[in-house]
Image (cartoon, coloured by chain):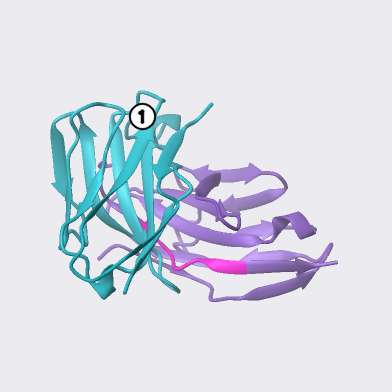
Amino acid sequence: NAGVTQTPKFRILKIGQSMTLQCAQDMNHNYMYWYRQDPGMGLKLIYYSVGAGITDKGEVPNGYNVSRSTTEDFPLRLELAAPSQTSVYFCASREGTGVSRKNIQYFGAGTRLSVL
Amino acid sequence: GNSVTQMEGPVTLSEEAFLTINCTYTATGYPSLFWYVQYPGEGLQLLLKATKADDKGSNKGFEATYRKETTSFHLEKGSVQVSDSAVYFCALDLNTGNQFYFGTGTSLTVIP
């Protein structure tokens, strides 16, 4: 009954370092999303995917990259970490869109990232 | 543009008090509306939803009614418990796959 799994839970990076945040879901959902949550702010969409091999930019994509080679996995890559990327990152998935239960998003527990 | 405006917190209530967290929205089209809850150290999880005007979402004693005339989706609970302490997010979904808008979140602390 895993749902959406994110790793790592915490990470500290130095400016200019790179890392990949992992996200995996076991619900066979087509749609996957990456958000960042800054203090006192709502979630902002970074990238999303509507299926394996298909990704697109969200509201705040600069400094990030994604790939979706399988239905299950949707990693988020930070190439040159900057202090502005200090945030909590959430991955989410959902089955589909529309007004049915398919449009409910399921979230991972988050990755807390600090760039110093 | 599309947006969600949510009552600022933090909110502190005594156990068994009545809770209201205000949420208003601006949207093109016909959005679905959600309340998500985030417990400490966890991701967001769905609390309730409504998909069209006058729908009432309810779960765990929480309720919210989709009011198109006032573009609102206020969250209410008649008697809060300590276990309701969390951050609550109002959100709208334009049902296109990539257009979601979250409020800034309202932190609720319930004291015994």
Asked whether the viewer can see residue A105, the reply is: no
Q: Residue at x 40, y 45 (%)?
A: A7
Q: Chain of mark 1?
A: A
Q: Residue at x 36, y 29 (%)?
A: A95
Q: Position of residue B91 (x, y in %)?
A: 43, 55
Asked if the magenta segment contains residue B102, the reply would be: yes
On screen, B11 above or below B77? below
Q: Position of residue B53 (x, y in %)?
A: 46, 48
Quarter-wise, where is residue B21 in the image? bottom right
Magenta stretch in the rendered image:
B101-107
Name the residue carrying label 1: A95
Q: Is residue A60 left or right of residue B40?
A: left
Q: Position of residue B61 (x, y in %)?
A: 72, 48
Q: Amino acid at mark 1?
A: Glu
Q: Is residue A96 left or right of residue B58?
A: left
Residue closest to the eye, B45 or A2: A2
The quarter of the image holding the C terminus of chain B is bottom right
User: Counting other residues with Cα less than 10 Å from the Cα at mark 1, is it few (<14), some (14-19), or many (20 or more)?
Assistant: some
Asked if the magenta segment contains residue B65, the reply would be: no
Residue closest to the eye, A97 or A75: A75
Colour seen for chain A: cyan
Colour seen for chain B: purple
Q: Residue at x 67, y 51 (%)?
A: B62
Residue closest to the eye, B107 or B50: B107
